[in-house]
Image: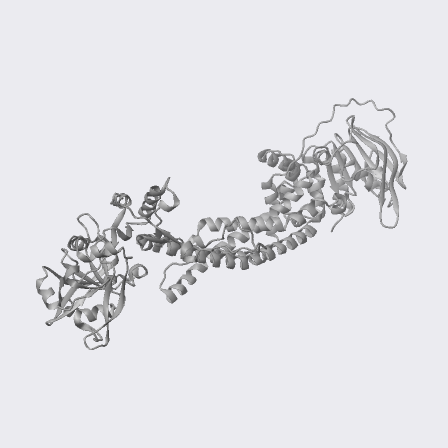
Amino acid sequence: MLEIKNIKKEYETKYFKQKALNGVSLSFRTNEFVAVLGPSGSGKTTLLNIIGGLDQFDEGDIVINGKSTKKFKNRDWDAYRNNCIGFVFQSYNLITHISVLANIEMGMTLSGVKSNIRREKALAALDKVGLKEHAFKTPNQLSGGQMQRVAIARALVNDPDIILADEPTGALDSKTSVEIMNLITEIAQDKLVIMVTHNRDLAEEYANRVIELKDGKMEKDSNPIKAHSEKENGFNIKKTAMGFFTALKLSANNIRTKKWRTGITAFASSIGIIGIALILALSNGLQMQIDDFERGTLSQMPIMISTNAMQFDALGPEESDLEQFSDATHVYPLPSIIEQMTHRNNITSEFIDYVNNIDQELIAGMSFMRATNLNVIANRDGVYLPLGLGHEFMIMPEKRDDNRWELVNNFYDVIEGRLPENKNELILMVDSRNRVNESILEALGFGGAEQVNFADLLDVEMRLVANDDFFQSMGIVYIPSTDFGRMYDESEVSLRIVGIIRGKEEHQLIVGGDAGMAFTEELMQHIYEMNRDSRIVRAQREANHNIMTGEMFAPGEDGERTKAQVLTFLGADLTPSLIQIFPRDFNSKELVLEYLDAFNEGRSEEDQIIYTDMAALISGLTGSLMNGVTFVLIGFSAISLVVSSIMIGIITYISVLERTKEIGILRALGARKKDITRVFNAETFIIGLTSGMLGITIAYFLTFPINRLIYGWTDLANVARLNPLHALMLIIVSLTLTLLGGFIPSKIASKKDPVEALRTE
């Protein structure tokens, strides 16, 4: 069955070489009890290790069932030890942190035996050595003789062909030694047992063959095989493999014996996870606040389309065909920043019709701002006051269905009076502190007053006056006339302030600065019809003056320079200078933007209509700031993750040193190098998983006091919200970093020599 041919083995140290075996040749029967004797250094343990595949020979060959092992690879030797060899050591070599039953099952686990069969065979082996009732104890709960019986049961359970015993009674008393030797003798009835011993009496009493070695050579063989006549039955062994679950179980049992160290390590590793989790929780919560604000408030900020649209992205990196830092003697024109940023929108009737066809279900309202002046004379206790400041008036945005003031109601509170019911009714808009432009109060007859009652403002009556009546010609410009009483009496359109509105508190970002007079689209149409054929408009068209409003100083009756309003163009053009579209909600805004983008498809750049999405500008800015701060804070916290990864590497290496003997035991049972790597990867996996889950748990509970503090400081509720996806991601990060940290120590463990590992105490 087993034949050793001219085996040579030499050990080389820094200072000398030693020949452990020098041309040993032996053949063994299928079942016999062979004792190998010899003084220390004679090579007997080396011979046992080479036969068991723990050590490799330099020259010669081992033939098993007629098959040479010269071309064996590591995985073949691993399978050979698992299938063909059973080891019984002097120091028992049991894994102390798993049960007796698990120790016996380990060899079968490596060879892939099913769990129920493993359990049945292991219990049967324990019963054979008389220790079935101790199956669930740990080895350190047994006596020396009992542990050696467990070792014998482990050696027998996988039904190997060869049992190798290295001083099996060396650590036992005489009575127990006899019991063990009787058990080994019984085993030798149907197996090949090779025992190394120093005790000649023990060898001669129990063995049926004694081989003596000296200086690496065979000196004597009491029962040699004279002729090899046994029929070989071939040689086929099953490859071994340790599953990750088995590795996890081994490592978990080991970790269980070091609870405090593992707990402290996991907590130290979790600190970085806690920091990043809290940062992400705060960032996530604040982003949700921003998103809620955007959906509830910013989403209804108007999409603005003006004749001169600002393109903020035009200030990005410059693209030019000109060479930088050129030596050429030329100067090239550079457009101004304003010119680069400004896009002239040609708002045509086609585009206006296109905008008017927006699905009314998507918008809360729409406003068209046109270049016009509202020429009004106010009657304040018999004093007639002109109010012709166009830039202080705005058209109220409204819907075109029955609920025409839905948009105004969304953004404003009516703090006095009511909303207009016809074109003759105006609204006074005040800011968040109930302020309005002092020029309006002055024009209404309240100049110099520190405060004005709402009721007094609603009591003022005004009249609308046509351009031709309100202005008189002074060459190329026009200034207001002075006969305001006559114009007031002759006007057919009476106007009155019927309500005072103020932007709602939650919408101050959108309308907080609105202050002035507002009127309806109907009144705008009336003004257009009133003034479109006026002499002033015709004169301005003939003179081809630019569209502008301004102020000048004109000489008064007393020779002093007095301030007067001057217009070089008066409103008679219905082409809007600004269109504001108010989406109903966030989703509606996206659909409106898609609708506007569709208008530009296939058009040249100058014919495209550029809009400004104020909500996107604000949320984009806040989002960028939030991301920037988050990344910086995560970067600082990540330093602790790197440190913890290094710490895990150190802890894993310490574990490798502590479990060196276990490495040797597993290799003796047939574990591959990759199985050893897997054992320590499993340990770092457990620590990483524990660390990640501990960090996430601590961070989650910390969000409660943090939210209380933030609420006390800012009135923002539930800011810190840990996203489950972030939590899962951080657990994966923790696992990855710990596995990386333990990678090198795990590789070191797999490369340990099994013979040296077994000698470790």
Q: Is residue 726 left or right of residue 164?
A: left
121 or 660: nearer the viewer: 660
Count the marks: how many? 0
460 or 244: nearer the viewer: 460
Residue 619, picture quadrant: bottom left
458 or 281: nearer the viewer: 458
> Eyeballing the image, is 167 above or below 24?
below
In the image, residue 93 lies at what x, y percent?
71, 45
Residue in view at x 82 percent, y 38 percent: 47
Q: Is residue 469 visible?
A: yes
In the image, residue 258 lies at what x, y percent?
61, 54
- Where does the N terminus fall, quadrant-wise? top right
Colour scheme: one colour
523 or 254: nearer the viewer: 523
Residue in view at x 36 percent, y 61 percent: 716
Q: Is residue 187 left or right of residue 545?
A: right
In the image, residue 145 lies at what x, y percent?
72, 45
Residue in view at x 21 percent, y 68 percent: 440
Q: Is residue 547 left or right of residue 186?
A: left
Residue 103, picture quadrant: top right
Q: Is residue 288 visible?
A: no
Residue in view at x 66 percent, y 41 percent: 675
Judged from this view, the residue extending furthest toward the front is: 475
In the image, residue 481 lies at what x, y percent?
16, 66
